Amino acid sequence: MKSLNLDKSKKYLLACSFGPDSMALFYLLKKDGYNYDAAIVNYHLREESNLEVDGLLNYAATHGVKVHVLDNKDVPVRNIESKCREIRYKFFKRLSDEFGYDAILVAHHQDDLIETYILQKQRQITPIYYGIRPNTTIFGVEVIRPLLDFNKADLLEICQTNNVPYSIDKSNFDTAIKRNKIRHEIVSKLSDKDRKKILEEINNENAKLDLIISNLKMDNICDVDYLKTLDNLSLAYCLNYMIRKVDSEQSLSKENVGEIRKIIISSQPNIISRIKKNVLLLKEYNKLSFINPENDYFNFSFEVKEPTILDTPYFYLDFTGDTSNRNVHISDYPLTIRNAKKDDRIKIKDYYSTVRRLFIDWKMPISLRERWPLILNKNNEIIYIPRYSKDFKIAPGVNFFVKF
């Protein structure tokens, strides 16, 4: 039987779903004498979920293995797969910090690796890595995949031969899901020779990526002028690297990369574009970046009832002294401090100007415009807008400054 090649001096946390893959890994870890606990999340998305948790707890008890259970009551309704992944890895991170686990073990296997590669090729994307990495880091915790040399048939045989209980998620048989279609119609029918050929192809593709990486100036990948100089393959790698910093599940297709190249070479200095459902692309003069607009990125509002000190993620103020430099007087209270909105206007001397026009004149990056703080008086009139300056530095004793 193949070896797991793990370090017996370390303490591991096994991410367990009670499926055959993670249960086979549970058995192998116990058989080979590794030091580990298990963790399972009950998302309450399937009727069987309670039975699966009970099944793991019962089996673990007979083998003296501790199990951590997260009973997740906040059932996701959108982006379910991504949300569940975030929930479980934050859970694993918390457990690792509390109990001192050296790494998280997950049961991805050779079939998963090949499925991922075929899916990457079908989607015509240039990923950060082809297939699945044996080791990675998620939320600052090392994640190890020790089963990448095992195929699905190996793991089922381990469970069945050794009376290891497991549950099958019925949704895995839904071939309307692209990954399932690849799994059942392609990967499950591969011969050993075909598998070997695909695994060699994956290694070769990753060697090409390594060569690309070695020639890139990674410190400059947000620089528009630098991105203009790159060929399509190098640009695709850089953009996928950047977008995965925002959402590790996202990948850009060749079509996406082509769209972004047009934005990069455009003479328009500020552009905001929805590249993916949950990701916005920002071009701000000579800087390119991705953001997730779902993270309350733009909207905030604070009420200030009286002169006080307020420290927020967006701005700092100390209005306990003279605030005439911010055009704020005691008669203006209570104040509202919120992010700028599209139709905001401010009175300057005897005329009104749109706030948007001021931002353009200040050459403010577009990513700041919708989250720039404004101060409004009790009559809901904008009385102060902190001026944007690219070279702004916080001076000692300043009574208001923006943190972006």
Image (tube, helix red, strand yellow):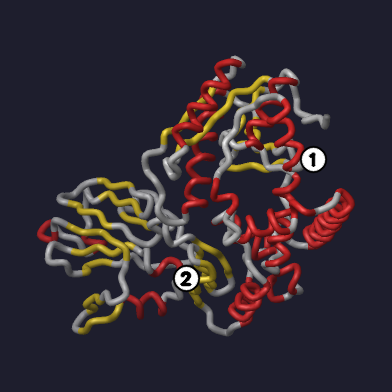
> Which residue lies under the disc numbered 2?
365
Label 2 sits on what residue type? Pro
The C terminus, quarter of image: bottom left
- Residue 373 % position (x, y): 32, 62
> Which residue lies under the disc numbered 1?
149
Mark 1 Cα within 10 Å, few/some/many (few <14, many 20+)? some
Q: Is residue 326 left or right of residue 213?
A: left
Above or below 75: residue 212: below
**In the rendered image, which quarter is residue 243 located in?**
bottom right
The N terminus, quarter of image: top right
Give the SS element for disc 2: loop
Residue positioned 44% across, 72% down in the render: 364
Label 1 sits on what residue type? Asp
Say whether residue 236 is visible. Answer: no
Q: Is residue 72 left or right of residue 28?
A: left
Give the SS element for disc 1: loop
Checking the image for residue 386, the label placed there is none
